Amino acid sequence: MVVDVPAEEQPIHEQRTEAPSVGDVSASTGIPDPGEPLTLDRPRNRNLQSSKVPSSRLGRLFHYGGLAASLGYGAASELIRRTTSSADEHASSSLMLTEGNIKRLVSKLTQMRGAALKLGQFMSIQDSHVLPPEIEDIFRRVQDSAHYMPDWQMEAIMQEALGPSWMDNFESFDRLPFAAASIGQVHSAVLKASVSPTGSPARVAVKVQFPNIVNSINSDLGYVKMLLTAGKLLPRGLFLDRTIQVMKEELADECDYTREASFARRFGQADHLGADPRFKIPWVWEGSTDRVLVMEHVDGVSVGGSVIDRLSQRDRNDIAERIIDLCLRELFVFRVMQTDPNWTNFLWNPRTRKVELVDFGATREYSKEFIDNWLHLLSAAVAEDRDACVEWSLKLGYLTGQENETMLDAHVKSMVLLGTPFKASTPQPFKFGQDSTWADITAEIRAQIPVMLQHRLTPPPRETYSLNRKLSGAFLLASRLNASVDCRTLWQKVVDGYRFG
Ligand SMILES: Nc1ncnc2c1ncn2[C@@H]1O[C@H](COP(=O)(O)OP(=O)(O)OP(=O)(O)O)[C@@H](O)[C@H]1O
């Protein structure tokens, strides 16, 4: 059975000709128009399409069931093709991973959104280059395409969240979203002066959550896991069960926009980033709900986008330094971290020269005890002290004490490599980007991963999933910016100011 594409599915560009280009912020930022709308330049939004999000349990089951059947059909056709073609007889790749099946999987995961799309994001950042290239390709393609709800579905959610006269709060509301993400879509609107926190009409970004996402997390992740394990697509040492469990918890948190609003407010306070002239945190409208989040609209462009390449080296160094510094302060000063390092969550505003931060849904708090231990471990890595690295890894639960020497070597080596930018002996400013020391280090860390996947006896501690994702994401961003950053000074500053216990 091949799954039908819903009748209401429609490429966004057909509608976009009518709609104002809300994504084009070149006028307000003064950045030259690179020839395409800036917002859509963000990687994940290249293929926005409108399609109904299946919200009933039966509807979702039908979609996944149809997908499994069509993948099976694809695998059977591939088997027939291979057995009739001698050249392919000894091909080692899984039968499930034919181009046709990959396309089916991408299209279905994109349409189901929610957990499925999040899994794609999570795995592609979390375990980059751990997964077989075909799987990485699937997740990359899922990330690069996104769907949005048809107008009637968005209207129903707005009515439920803000009441039937929800439009009374807005002077204008662009019914076509300018961004579609894993669990919601974002509209541009203007709040009326009477309800605006500024006392005058205010441009806002309105994030509207897809229907029934919260209830579908468990079953969706179960289906996705079934599809991945049925094809024996993933390495065993990935501890997929733990990964999925952590994702479930993270996703459940992210579906609560009230939680996101409270973290955004916290980051906006003076003792966090409110008084820091390098950053801008959008305010949150008090009428926001757990499913509809209304925030001040910020005008910057994604620091990973093509526009950034036109910035001076000095600006790129400066932006990367802010992001790495923020990462260290979130960990060792605030003990609260926004853990989604997606480029689209860091926006550079050349007019105000601030880094604008959006998406506090993936914010986590860490206990003092965990951060104490983690700082001990990272300090041991920076000092290249093997015994201390093992000791603190045991305390944190990274190791069980039963590991063989091969695993211990690979684990310590990867930690020491991660600490290289902060080492006293590393020449500063530290160069990220292509053909840099960092590129060599990344290659060396990657080389340790298959060893660890083979010999790892226990899944990494829960906290480290989000923490490592953010740290490696920050370094990746610095590489994307081709930046040089004095990481040692940043490190020294937080370590000197840290009080253990
Ligand atoms: N306040 C804002 N001003 C301008 N653009 C915004 C704002 N908030 C969000 N956006 C845009 O909408 C996109 C999606 O928002 P956000 O990342 O908060 O959603 P999400 O559902 O948490 O996405 P994901 O989990 O996939 O990162 C952002 O990457 C950004 O492009």
Image (cartoon, rainbow, N blue to C red):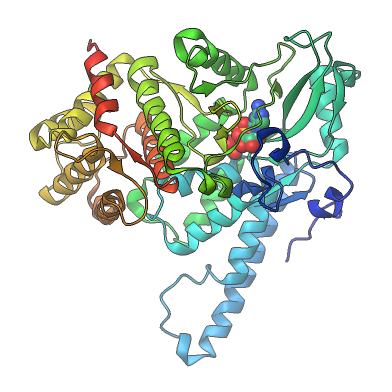
Quadrant assignment, res 415: top left
Quadrant where the N terminus is found in the figure: bottom right
Q: Relative to residue 163, is residue 319 drawn left or right?
A: left
Q: How many marks?
A: 0
Residue nearest the viewer, comparing 30 with 500 = 30
Q: Position of residue 468 (x, y in %)?
A: 36, 36
Q: Position of residue 457 (x, y in %)?
A: 24, 44
Residue nearest the viewer, comparing 364 with 428 = 428
Vertically, is 91 above or below 33?
Answer: below
**Residue 159 visible in the displayed image:** yes
Q: Position of residue 331 (x, y in %)?
A: 36, 22
**Residue 214 visible in the displayed image:** no
Quadrant assignment, res 418: top left
Q: Relative to residue 338, is residue 142 drawn left or right?
A: right
Vertically, is 415 above or below 17?
Answer: above
Residue found at x 14% / y 47%: 409
Residue found at x 70% / y 53%: 35
Q: Relative to residue 367, is residue 162 drawn left or right?
A: right
Vertically, is 193 above or below 47?
Answer: above
Residue found at x 53% / y 40%: 303
Q: Position of residue 453 (x, y in %)?
A: 29, 51
Residue nearest the viewer, comparing 380 with 345 = 345
Quadrant where the C terminus is found in the figure: top left
Residue nearest the viewer, comparing 360 with 435 = 435
Rendered-image quarter of ligand 1: top right
